[in-house]
Image: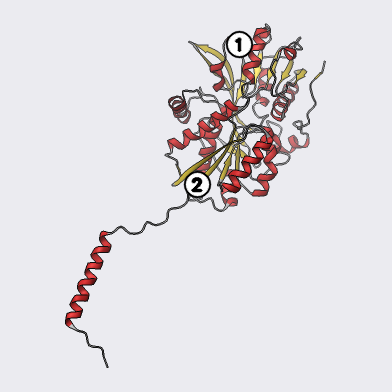
Amino acid sequence: MPKRIDRRAFVAGAASGAAATTLSAALPMPAIAQSAPFKIGLLTVKTGPLAQGGIQMEQGLVTLLKQKNYTLAGRKVELISADTGGNPAGAKTKASEVIERDKVDVVLGPLAAFEVLAINDYIRQQGMPLISLAGAEDVTQRLANPWIMRTSASSAQCCHPLGDYAAKELKYKRAATIADDLAFGYEQLSAFQRVFEDDGGKVVKKLWPPLVTPDYTPYIAQIGNVDCVVNGFAGSNPVKFMRAYADLGMKRIPLLGGWTAMDDALLKSLGDEAVGVVSASWYSASLDNASNTRFVADMAKDYNVVPGGYSAGMYVAGQVVEAALEKTGGKADDRKAFNEALRGVSLTDTPRGPVKFDAYGNVVGDVQIRRCERKGRALVNTIVKIYSDVSQFWTYGDKAFLANPVYARDWPPAKNLE
């Protein structure tokens, strides 16, 4: 038998339903869960002789994130910065912390070649995309790691054109080299030697002071009968070295440097001892393009500093991360797909100029030859020549280059080659 519908009950029920509809419209709907923030783990150095560069690394990345309102390709970004202490053990510890504890989506850094060599196998085991500032040759050459790429330069990349410029343009024939006794120093100056000697020059002396050297006088005293001295120091050591070099009356012998030796950020700490020094770098604060103009202005406004390669390297790394996220629609949970997107990035507007990546994950970009000059009270690196689209393999080609590697970590120790 059909159920009877009571009119009074129907009216009351209808009124109740209408009230519920009105109430639900007045109350906010439950928020739809937002995607988790994209996490960047930065391995940098804030203590020890490499700290100046490490602090700039963080400043450069933060500058980009501020410009982007901490949002890349629609994803909110969380930055986790870790101080490695500038040593292999610290790099290992901090890498495991940001990857396993903090669950980052990408790692940027570390600074030093010996640091990235220390975590190379771990990064491969974890399958974690890493954009390195460190120039260790092996990770993008003989032992190429498919999870590591570089937006700065390999250790040797800038010293190849420096050797070419010294021989062909400056007409130097005999050179001495001096750098920190570590992987970055060996790899830089062996690159200079290879190209310089290919072009008719000769390196007749190699000197390797320890990273922590209180006085460079005993080393500088061994230099003589050369047309130039090439220094490959990093961190704050170039400042100590150049002051000692000038104090000992050595400015009669022209001084050349790799990118860390005459980094723009160091110039505020130098005086007339730096005037005339010729260097090669993949980044210069004086480079005239839209991205660099904004970058330099924001670094000056926020930190009252002139940016150098350490900060520019991380700024460009952030740009590459953003471009990769745009390719993947903001997704990074599939590490392999995200890693492939990173390595496929090609940019035209960065503070260092156009960048792309070779099959080994290393950047291909311009290298600038600069001469340090005084303009008013300030020292500046004036660009005198640009080598375009410089590969980590220079002009040799990857197969020929890797068949005859000269950048081994056990490169010969200091000795007089005369």
Tell me the element at label 2.
strand
What's the CA distance linking mark 1 and mark 2? 45 Å
Q: Alpha-carbon neighbours of circle 1 within 10 Å: few (<14), some, or many (≥20)?
A: some
Q: Residue at x 55, y 18 (%)?
A: 267
- Taking the image as shown, residue 206 lies to the left or right of residue 280, namely right
Viewer-nearest residue: 359 or 146: 146
Q: x%, y% of residue 362?
A: 63, 37
Q: Is residue 175 visible?
A: yes
Q: Quadrant of residue 248?
A: top right
Q: Is residue 173 visible?
A: no
Viewer-nearest residue: 4 or 177: 4
Viewer-nearest residue: 107 or 337: 107
Q: Quadrant of residue 403?
A: top right
Q: Vertically, is 131 above or below 327? A: above
- Taking the image as shown, residue 385 lies to the left or right of residue 206, namely left
Q: Which mark is residue 38?
A: 2
Front of the two marks 1 and 2: 2
Q: Quadrant of the N terminus?
A: bottom left
Q: x%, y% of residue 275?
A: 58, 11
User: Which residue position holds label 1?
Assistant: 273
Q: Quadrant of the C terminus?
A: top right
Q: Residue at x 65, y 29 (%)?
A: 157
Q: Vertically, is 98 above or below 153? A: below
Viewer-nearest residue: 60 or 43: 43
Q: Quadrant of residue 46?
A: top right
Label whose residue precedes the other's in the sequence (1 or 2): 2
Coloration mode: secondary structure
Q: x%, y% of residue 151?
A: 58, 35
Q: x%, y% of residue 37?
A: 48, 48
Name which residue type carries label 2. Answer: Phe
